[in-house]
Amino acid sequence: NSPAPLPERAIYGFALFLGSWFGFLLYLIWAYVPETWLFSLGLTYWPQKYWAVAVPVYLLVAIGFGYVLLFGINMMSTAPLNSTHTVTDNYAKKQQQKKFQVEAIPALRDIPISEVNRMFFLPEK
Amino acid sequence: EEQRYFSASGAPLWLRRRQHSASCRELAVRGPRLQLRSLSAATSAVWLAAYGLFVLCQNSMVLSAAIFITLIGLIIYLHFVKIDQESLLVISSLGIQVTSSYASGKESTTFTEMGQVKDVVISEAIHMQKVIYYLCILLRDPADPQGVSEVVPLFQSSKPRLDCLIEVYRSCQEILEQSKATPQSS
């Protein structure tokens, strides 16, 4: 799964490059060439030209809306002040206590909030 | 008797501590009263907007409606929104009582008995694009002796800063130690 260049990736990249240029030229032809010329060539089944302007506008408005939506989703998924998620969670509740070994670094664990408070706030300055 | 602190948003607060007895303490946080300048500013803004509307549509009912809205809005604000004082009464053998007094005189009280109180701690949480310290009561979980079933945040409308919270925390912990040292016989 390394990001190194491979021959298959070069082929995919080139195919995407050609495909996107083709799509862009097709979009320009559809948007600018008058309908009568396209009909005379025999190509009659195109979407309405209204969409050549409408789709880019929809996309840009969706991007701007996405900023506001992401901000709102972030605010909604923040835990409220009265939820237990601000104090503990499932991993902390189920953690196992490792035995204390003399002269070894203590194992990593979640310290309960009462203990943390006593350590921080009770000693006099 | 009263010490001056600041709230998380910069407004001045006053903390008053009273010791009623060896096992009973009351801590009250008082915010500033409704200022005349903010009341005048709000009233003038509403009346200027109503006058602008009146000039546009020439209907004098807009002016009477604006006066009515200002009066009703002020009454609703004083009775339901503006909390003047929040107080915490800790009695070591009984429990903890939290009272909020509104500007109109209304008081709303909640009592938690000591058997349900696990601890009173200062926790920090994200609140509206800020991280604030707040004092909260942790309630015991009947199923799990080490677990917390509920978190009750205190001083929600005045939001004092950490220095005020540390004073309140130390006072509460002295009383709570007494209740833990003498366990009740149920």
Image (spheres, rainbow, N blue to C red):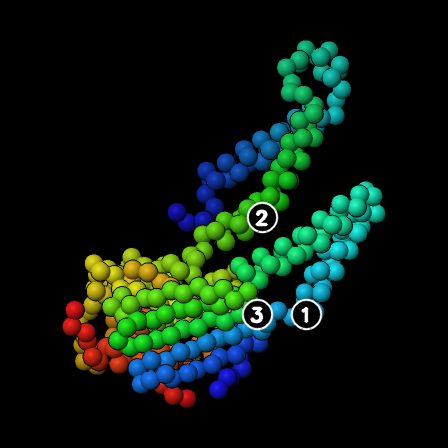
Q: Earlier in the sequence, mark 1 or mark 3?
A: 3
Dots 1, 3 in contact, CB < 8 A: no
Name which residue lies at 29% across and 68% down: B113
Mark 2 highlights which residue? Answer: A68
Amino acid on which the number 3 mark rests in the picture: Ser
Whether residue A32 can be seen here: yes
Residue B153 appears in which quarter of the rendering? bottom left
Residue A19 appears in which quarter of the rendering? top right
For disc 1, the neighbor class at 10 Å (few under 14, some 14 to 19, many from 20) is: few
Which structural element holds mark 3? loop
As drawn, the label of residue B9 is: 3
B173 above or below B157? below
B148 displayed left or right of A82: left
Same chain for the residues at labels 2 and 3, yes or no?
no
* Disc 1/disc 3 C-alpha distance (Å): 20 Å
Amino acid on which the number 1 mark rests in the picture: Leu
Chain ID at mark 2? A
B172 above or below A13? below
Name which residue lies at 55% across and 46% down: A69
For disc 3, the neighbor class at 10 Å (few under 14, some 14 to 19, many from 20) is: few
From the top left corner, tell me how far across and down residue B172 is, in percent: 35, 78
From the top left corner, tell me how far across and down residue B119 is, in percent: 31, 71
Same chain for the residues at labels 1 and 2, yes or no?
no
